[in-house]
Image (cartoon, rainbow, N blue to C red):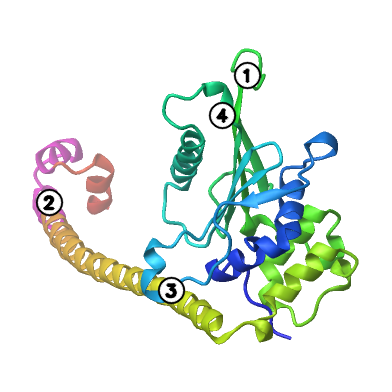
Amino acid sequence: MQFADPKNDLAFKKIFGDEKHKSILISFLNATLDFQNEKTIVDIALANSYQIPKIPELKETILDIQATNQNGDTFIVEMQKKDLGNFTKRSLYYTSKAYVAQLPKGQDYTLLKKVYFIGILNFNIFSNENYISRHLIINQETNKQDLDDFEFTFIELPKFTKELEALDSVLDKWVYFLKNAANLTMIPSQYKTLQEFQEAFSIATQTTWDIKELEVYEYMALKEFDERNALQTAERKGLQKGIEQGIEKGIEQGIEQGIEQGIEQGIEQEKLAIAKNLLDILDDETIAKKTDLSVEMVHSLRN
């Protein structure tokens, strides 16, 4: 059995953004945001439900997930495989844009609802060791969340190192699924009692995909491979150029140092020759002053 990589943009949207399988996204959101009791999400409406994108239009296609819950709160979920820089600023931009879009011009600000941003990253951006981090707007003096309309959660996949046997929460299972599903050949026993995971693995089974979906999936995977290969090639060329420049500079410095050392050694030999000629007519202290040698050196020459 071959599962698609959930980190692939198409696979991620197909698994978590399908209106027919909302329970998958609901489970992921509740686990990621630790929603329990009255905060538990029971239903969502997807703003951009899954559709197969056209390859020529991929640059303009929105592939992240946006949904609202029963209270009107907005959730933005984005998978990011490559570190393009400034991802935190990008998350602020998307969150602010979704917040403003709620309110038609001239409407009452009290109608604005909370926006949650969840970034799933295949790279690290923070120095903390935990694979998940939550970011709030906190009052510096009271440590209270007085401005509570924005919340940011980041999942850094490289920091997640748990094995199957150590998965002890629904969140752990989701993160393991996101990171490792493409390497599995069967559904692990740890997932078989949870319906939302059964659905997720079923959707990720590529034998059930149509030709068009497989074509877009492979196109995205190949595009990513080409970008990564181009980056590695640029890095190799940069490294090679740096080495060549370093060798060239080292040779130049070596020649300069050799000349300097040769001159210094020549001067030193000249001083010694002069000192030897003066041994019969001057005392050691005077010879040392005349030749700029140490008294000990002159004394050793005399002996």
Q: CA distance from mark 3 to mark 4?
A: 34 Å
Q: CA distance from mark 2 to mark 1?
A: 81 Å
Q: Residue at x 67, y 47 (%)?
A: 132
Say if 156 sits above or below 69 in the image: below
Quadrant where the N terminus is found in the figure: bottom right
Q: Residues within 10 Å of mark 2 (few under 14, many from 20)?
A: some
Q: Secondary structure at mark 1?
A: loop
Q: CA distance from mark 1 to mark 3?
A: 44 Å
Residue on which disc 2 sits: 271
* Residue in view at x 56 percent, y 52 percent: 47
- For the record, the magenta segment spans 268-291
Q: Which residue corresponds to mark 1?
A: 146
Mark 3, secondary structure of its residue: loop
Q: Nearer the viewer, residue 294 or 143?
A: 143
- In the image, residue 296 sits, relative to residue 209, either above or below, namely above
Cα separation between marks 4 and 1 = 16 Å
Residue 112's label in the rendered image is: 4
Residue matched to label 3: 54
Q: Is residue 160 above or below residue 105?
A: below
Label 4 secondary element? loop
